[in-house]
Image: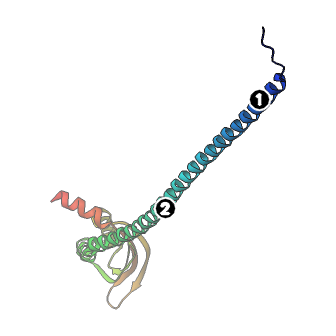
Amino acid sequence: MANINLLPWREEAREKQKRDYTGILALVFLVSGLVVYLFLMTIDMFVDDQKSRNTYLQSEIQLLESQIAEITKIRTRKKDIERRTEIILDLQQSRNLPTHVLDELVRVVPPGIYLSSIEKKGSQLWIEGRSESNNNVANMMRKVAASSWLHDPNMQSIVAQKEELRQLQRFTLRVSIVNDAANSQTQGASK
């Protein structure tokens, strides 16, 4: 005869289905919790890695900033040294200037002119003197204009003055001095 099962199999199947459902639900909960935990751990690892990179970059930035500050100090010192060197070179080049100017004055002063004072103010030479005639002063101005060390003669004043035996004109003349560096280059090229 046929086997008839009178036991409540549907309830057992339902109970089994409930147990399976809660088991699967617990398993899904555990797996999702594990996935979330692994995801958070990965994010923490990335954050820690990024923090270590940022710390490294900050230390390198501080190192570079200190090097930039040192470079700025070096550039400042370099400019100061260049300025001092330029001053020394200018002094070196102009140390013979008074000799050349006085030598040139001897050449440009014609007979009949008597110099009483010579004063240098910057690149200007102020000459005061006496002359027997205005032609002598004009000749001197022409020679100054043609000179290699002096140029741009400018008569400031000329006044007739009666001395004991003869009449002399008192004059004041302003003359510009040629730049020594440019002049020495042209003189070196002409030699």
**Crowd rating for badge 1 (residues with CA inside 10 Å; few <14, some 14–19, many 20+):** few
Image quadrant where one finds the N terminus:
top right
**Which residue is drawn at the image coordinates 84% and 26% (left, top)?**
11
Quadrant of the image occupied by residue 143: bottom left
Task: State which tag comes first along the sequence, 1 or 2.
Answer: 1
* Above-or-below relation of 179 to 112: above
Q: Position of residue 81 (x, y in %)?
A: 35, 71
Q: Is residue 109 visible?
A: no
**Which residue is drawn at the image coordinates 24% and 77% (left, top)?**
99
* Above-or-below relation of 97 to 147: below
- Residue on which the image places disc 2: 59
Q: Position of residue 170 (x, y in %)?
A: 39, 81
**Crowd rating for badge 2 (residues with CA inside 10 Å; few <14, some 14–19, many 20+):** few
- Front position in the image: 119 or 88: 88
- Front position in the image: 49 or 17: 17
Quadrant of the image occupied by residue 54: bottom right
Which of the numbered marks, if any, corresponds to residue 16? 1
**Which residue is drawn at the image coordinates 64% and 42% (left, top)?**
34
The extreme bottom residue here reads 164
Q: Position of residue 109 (x, y in %)?
A: 27, 74
The extreme top residue here reads 1
Instruction: Tell me which amino acid carries mark 2.
Output: Ser
Mark whose residue sits in front, 1 or 2: 1
Describe residue 119's horizontal placement relative to residue 56 as left or right. Answer: left
Q: Secondary structure at mark 2?
A: helix
Instruction: Tell me which amino acid carries mark 1.
Output: Lys
Describe residue 108's horizontal placement relative to residue 123 as left or right. Answer: left
